[in-house]
Image (cartoon, helix red, strand yellow):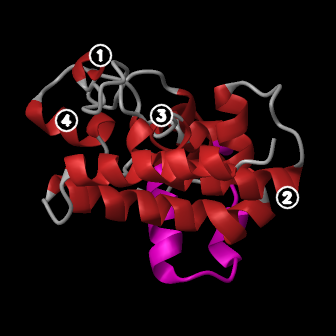
Amino acid sequence: MIISLNDHIAQWTRDIERIGGVNGSGRNKLRSYRLFKTTYQVDGYCSMHMSSSHRSVFAKFRCGVAPIRLETDRYEGLQESQRLCPFGCGVVKSEQHVPLNCPLYLHERNIMLQKARSVIGDFTRLGEEELFCLLFIHPDMIRVVVAKTCLDILKLRNNVLYSKISLVRYCDLLTYTLLLCVRLKPV
């Protein structure tokens, strides 16, 4: 069956705007994607000059398929409200939580936000969703830092999960780094 482009775009729009999952259970996997997509066209980041590994992981975060608890725990049949961050946050580990709030990725987040301030300026009045959207839409942020941050986050996640670096050792290094930063901070 051949469908017209207009019918295809109409179906795409319904799929993006749907709240529930395709099979009727859970939420729409396109929950993050619809924050960025309002028109049926190729995303600008697809034609940006960046490595395939950066583009791939960036697309996974945008499309809601990054290997984080919100996505991976659905295979265990857990409800979304049960897919909590294992690092003591007590919140669902989502595409927004990981780069913006998760304590495990504090170092990566600080680098990303420091660069964001130099590119975007002051964004302290933005809400979490607005900041997330801005970081993942702004062309200079995507190319310069967000795609790399997403890759660094997933590398660290894999290292911690698969014991290449113990979580205790990582937290010790992070604490030492934070203490050093506080000591070196100008008064």
Q: CA distance from mark 1 to mark 2?
A: 35 Å
Secondary structure of the residue carrying numbered label 1: helix
Judge the density around disc 4: few (<14), some (14-19), many (≥20) Cα neighbours within 10 Å: some
Q: CA distance from mark 4 to mark 2?
A: 35 Å
User: What range is drawn magenta here?
Assistant: 36-61
Q: Which sits in the foreground, 85 or 170?
A: 170
Q: Which sits in the foreground, 89 or 71?
A: 89
**Pointers 1 and 3 in contact (CB under 8 A)?**
no
Please, what is the three-letter code of the amino acid marked with disc 2? Answer: Val
Say whether residue 15 is left or right of residue 39: left
- Residue 134, how many percent across, how many down? 75, 44
Residue assigned mark 3: 97
Residue assigned mark 1: 81
Residue at 63% of width from left, 57% of height from top? 111
Q: Earlier in the sequence, mark 4 or mark 3?
A: 4
Secondary structure of the residue carrying numbered label 4: helix
Q: Which sits in the foreground, 110 or 17?
A: 110
Q: Earlier in the sequence, mark 1 or mark 2?
A: 1
- Residue 45, how many percent across, how many down? 67, 67
